């Protein structure tokens, strides 16, 4: 991809495969995911910038590192691994990952938040976008749905499908998250991987100022999870977390895995980095141009 | 319609679940710690591999059920209606109904007939909420056999569904052979002077009221609207047109439940005077079930008195009668 293509406000057609790769192999993918998030949001004129940009590296490893097995042409078959976005407001990063994996046309990203779009402001299962397993947006519910899916796979169908679910850190303030966590370890769901995007920001401010959720790792441990804290912007560290999950499932440890990814909200765009003000707003056109220019200059 | 004995509707739910479990291997049940009360214990004993105890966590149980449903299972979650219709309202709205997840909820201990447990456990508002949820099917069976049939039917219909049942024994008057079809109201007694439209335990009270009215030469039509949603507009509209006035009766707030559904239907299709029998904007309380039903005005006597007022409003014009008096309990 040329610098011009990368810096463009227009969507391109480049897609990426889902396979085991070296840590540095994820950088161009995460970068393209971030650029698509900017392109989507500036067109939509509303939506969440910070969380999606900050978690782009997690999504690059999840969708393009061979950890989640799926067929982009048949996302609804009943054999693939599943991902549930519990933090529904982070939809743009999931939409971008799915588009870049070839699950639907990348150009369609321009319809985000528009009337009748498959890319609803928060994921809507009724719109049948391939790869959107469930509606989410009311925080604390997606993780429970994922636990139900993992129960179905491990305890009833007895297959080896994996279920991943990502929550935010502010989302941990919802009590039902911990009901789900309790049940994941109660049922010994070693096929379940809980991803926590720990950017320490939520709409009203820093997470501990709004309502302290720390220590997250000790809580996850206490709830029976094999817990790994990783640098959410370091691909080899992220891979270490996902590898640990695969190992837990392979060894039938009977324990679910929690990966706490330390991230910065808005990461990749310097004027958004670690600023909670960017939780719930889109860039202006000028800001989008500047953001794309900055992202295009990275690997 | 004759009395065939007494049994709680929750027994019908429990037996119906076992019927379903035998027919369909993908029916699974989630427990909320009170499995003996809501009779899911019967399924648990019979199919232990398909029963999961979720503990006292209704929000989690509801969303786990959604995850199971999105994986091709037919999950039932049962608890007290106070906790599995309202505490988990957001989960029902988004994870179940918006997802069109094939989740089934059994809401037990509904209404004031719970008895001594008191107001916290006597849910009287959930029909109003559940019937506004898109895609939801909402059933209020009248007796044991109907609850059993309704449980099987809701399990075999694809989509979110909720069944409301009670703790205390109630009269049995339908049999295995009585027709039951989701969404299709049953006309139990024919008549053209007044329509008594009821569900749950108030159906039998309506039958008793109709029998009393018959002694005065008044022929009452008794309609059992066991499915509040999807609502049987045709049968209710026909009753309004042919009888000219209606009494609704339910063990629920008079607002927005069955009475509300009947009023919405007739306001559009056939406006006629309606009198509403139900709990009048108050909470329940402790007491014997029968004592509570009498004190909260949920017996045949109120239905009888309301029928007389409804007919008077129809014959003399609504506004004049309404100013003269409100419905009092029948003292005769």
Image (cartoon, rainbow, N blue to C red):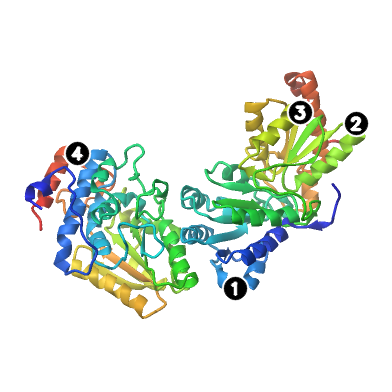
Q: Of callouts 2 and 3, which one flags the residue occurring earlier in the amino acid sequence?
A: 2
- Residue at 43 percent across and 56 percent down: it is A141
| Residue at the image point whose x is 64% and y is 36% from the top | B261
Residue at the far front: name it.
Answer: A73
Which residue lies at the image location 42% right of the left edge and 47% below the top edge?
Answer: A126
- In this view of the protein, can residue B288 be seen by the observer? no
Instruction: Find numbered disc 3 in the image and state the secondary structure of the residue it sits on.
Output: helix
CA gap between label 2 and label 1 equals: 56 Å
Q: Nearer the viewer, residue A81 or B228?
A: A81
Disc number placed over residue B48 in the picture, else none? 1
Q: Earlier in the sequence, mark 2 or mark 1?
A: 1
Residue beneath label 3, please?
B242
Location of the C terminus of chain A (image quadrant): bottom left
Asked if residue A112 is positioned above or below residue B267 in the image, the reply reads below
Among the 4 quarters of the image, the one containing residue A10: top left
Q: The residue marked by circle 4 belongs to what chain?
A: A
Please give the label number shown on residue B217.
2
Q: Chain of mark 3?
A: B
Q: Label 1 marks which chain's residue?
A: B
Q: Are marks 1 and 3 in contact (CB under 8 Å)?
A: no
Alpha carbon separation for disc pair 4 and 1: 57 Å
| Left or right: A16 in relation to A256 | left
Residue A283, horizontal then vertical, whole percent = 20, 42
């Amino acid at each position: 991809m040329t610098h011009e293509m990368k810096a463009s406000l227009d969507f391109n057609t480049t897609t990426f495969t889902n396979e085991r790769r070296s840590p540095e192999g994820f950088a161009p993918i995460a970068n393209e995911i971030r650029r698509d998030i900017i392109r989507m949001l500036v067109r939509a004129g509303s939506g969440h910038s910070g969380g999606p940009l900050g978690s782009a590296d997690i999504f690059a490893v999840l969708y393009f590192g061979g950890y989640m097995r799926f067929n982009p042409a048949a996302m609804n078959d009943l054999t693939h691994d599943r991902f549930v976005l519990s933090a529904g407001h982070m939809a743009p990063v999931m939409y971008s990952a799915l588009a870049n994996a070839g699950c639907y046309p990348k150009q369609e990203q321009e319809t985000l938040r528009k009337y009748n779009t498959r890319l609803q402001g928060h994921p809507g299962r009724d719109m049948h976008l391939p790869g959107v397993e469930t509606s989410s947006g009311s925080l604390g519910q997606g993780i429970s749905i994922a636990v139900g899916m993992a129960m179905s796979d491990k305890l009833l169908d007895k297959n080896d499908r994996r279920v991943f679910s990502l929550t935010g850190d502010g989302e941990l303030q919802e009590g039902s998250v911990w009901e789900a966590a309790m049940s994941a370890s109660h049922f010994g769901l070693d096929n379940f991987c809980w991803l926590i995007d720990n950017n320490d920001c939520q709409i009203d401010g820093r997470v501990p100022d709004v309502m302290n959720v720390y220590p997250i790792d000790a809580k996850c441990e206490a709830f029976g999870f094999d817990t790994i804290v990783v640098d959410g912007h370091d691909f080899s560290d992220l891979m270490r977390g996902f590898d640990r999950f695969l190992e837990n499932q392979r060894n039938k440890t009977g324990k679910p895995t929690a990966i706490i990814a330390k991230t910065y909200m808005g990461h990749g765009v310097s004027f958004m980095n670690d600023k909670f003000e960017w939780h719930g707003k889109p860039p202006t056109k000028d800001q989008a141009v500047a953001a794309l220019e900055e992202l295009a200059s990275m690997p | 319609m004759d009395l065939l004995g007494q049994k709680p509707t929750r027994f019908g739910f429990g037996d119906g679940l076992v019927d379903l479990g035998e027919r369909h291997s993908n029916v699974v049940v989630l427990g909320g710690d009170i499995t003996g009360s809501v009779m899911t214990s019967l399924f648990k004993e019979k199919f232990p591999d398909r029963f999961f105890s979720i503990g006292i966590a209704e929000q989690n149980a509801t969303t786990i059920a959604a995850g199971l449903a999105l994986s091709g299972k037919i999950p039932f979650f049962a608890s007290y209606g106070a906790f599995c219709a309202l505490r988990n309202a957001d989960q029902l709205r988004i994870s179940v109904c918006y997802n069109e997840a094939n989740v089934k909820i059994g809401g037990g201990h509904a209404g004031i007939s719970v008895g001594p447990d008191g107001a916290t456990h006597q849910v009287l508002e959930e029909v109003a909420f559940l019937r506004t949820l898109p895609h939801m099917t909402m059933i209020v069976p009248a007796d044991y056999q109907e609850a059993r049939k309704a449980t099987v039917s809701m399990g075999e219909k694809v989509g979110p569904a909720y069944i409301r049942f009670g703790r205390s024994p109630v009269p049995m008057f339908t049999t295995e052979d009585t027709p039951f079809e989701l969404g299709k109201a049953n006309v139990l007694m024919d008549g053209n002077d007044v329509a008594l439209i009821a569900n749950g335990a108030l159906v039998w009270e309506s039958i008793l009221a109709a029998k009393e009215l018959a002694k005065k030469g008044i022929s009452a039509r008794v309609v059992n609207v066991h499915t509040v949603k999807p609502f049987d507009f045709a049968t209710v509209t026909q009753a309004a047109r042919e009888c000219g006035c209606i009494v609704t009766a339910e063990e629920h707030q008079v607002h927005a439940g069955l009475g509300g559904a009947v009023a919405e239907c007739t306001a559009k299709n056939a406006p006629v005077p309606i009198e509403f029998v139900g709990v009048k904007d108050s909470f329940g309380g402790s007491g014997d079930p029968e004592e509570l039903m009498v004190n909260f005005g949920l017996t045949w006597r109120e239905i009888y008195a309301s029928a007389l007022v409804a007919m008077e409003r129809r014959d003399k014009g609504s506004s004049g009668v309404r100013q003269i008096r409100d419905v009092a309990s029948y003292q005769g």
